Amino acid sequence: MRSLKYLFLLIFMTSFAQEDEILQSIYFDFDKFDLRKDQQKELQKFIKTIDTSIVESIQISGYCDDRGKDAYNFDLSTKRANTIKDTLLLNGIKSKIIVSIQGKGSIMIDEDLESNVPEVRSKNRRVDVLVNFKPPIVKRTKPENYTVLRKDVIVGDKITLDKVFFDRGSSRLTTSAKKELDKIAIRMHRFPKIELEVQGHICCTPSYQKEAVDKDTKKRELSVNRAKAVYKYLISRRVNEKRLIYNGYGNTQPLGGSTDQDRRVELVITKIE
């Protein structure tokens, strides 16, 4: 019976079916709220198994058995919860992730329905530590198309500069286009490991004529010049030219909307160091 008593005083861990949380129960001696050295060691072992970088929150709930007055048991259960909180903090757990510390008083039992009342009561003299984990980050494998340069890009992602358009037949950047490219340059500095291709596009040419004439150069190189204009502007905003290449794709990749949308430039992620 004595060995059984100490078995239930040891700390054990119950892992729920859900992968997003773990429940750890810490058992106390009768009418005590401090931990013996062996209990402290077991709790420290548990703490070492926690990857705090993926912990979202920790909830601490203290309990008592059903002997004693309610007010006394509530106070004792609160002290037990605070003992565990202090131990977690002393072992490197950050206070900001401990979101709840509660004493919940006694757990009532029906002695007529329990086959081993002392054992049940020993299990009720405890503190439950519920560790909730952050949802796992699922890395994308399929490239996506969006309008803002983000941190979580992968190779092949395409950023359509939906506010960087050109006049018909022109590769000159408008004032509004430059303002948008200023924002891109800032984000390029913020994410220095990203390299990309600047892709130029055109509209309104026959299917057999893949490229259009740039009215300034009088040469059939409009999509290339549009990509080059963006490329040079980003460099002028101190983006390292080694992170950029540019190419013109003519009318081969229409968006299927208005012709204004086809007079565009896109950025495609080519490398992430």
Image: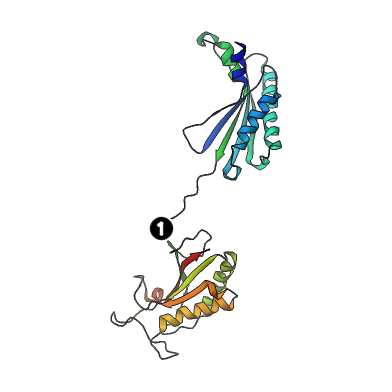
In the image, taking residue 242 as reference, residue 207 lies left or right, namely left
Q: What residue lies at 40% left-to-right and 73% top-to-bottom? A: 261
Q: What residue lies at 50% left-to-right and 10% top-to-bottom? A: 113
In the picture, the quarter occupied by the N terminus is top right
The part of the image, by quadrant, that contains residue 29 is: top right
Residue 93 % position (x, y): 66, 39
- Which of these two is toward me, 50 or 160? 50
Q: What residue lies at 58% left-to-right and 79% top-to-bottom? A: 236
In the image, taking residue 170 as reference, residue 24 lies left or right, namely right
- How crowded is the residue under tag 1: few (<14 C-alpha within 10 Å), some, or many (20+)? few
Residue 188 % position (x, y): 56, 68
Residue 41 % position (x, y): 66, 29
In the image, taking residue 233 as reference, residue 77 lies left or right, namely right
Q: Please give the residue where the numbered disc 1 appears in the rendered image.
A: 142
Q: Which amino acid does label 1 sit on?
A: Lys
* Residue 168 at least partly seen: no
Q: Give SS at disc 1.
A: loop
Residue 112 % position (x, y): 52, 8
* Residue 185 at least partly seen: yes
- Which of these two is toward me, 267 or 70? 267
Instruction: Return the residue found at the far left.
Output: 208
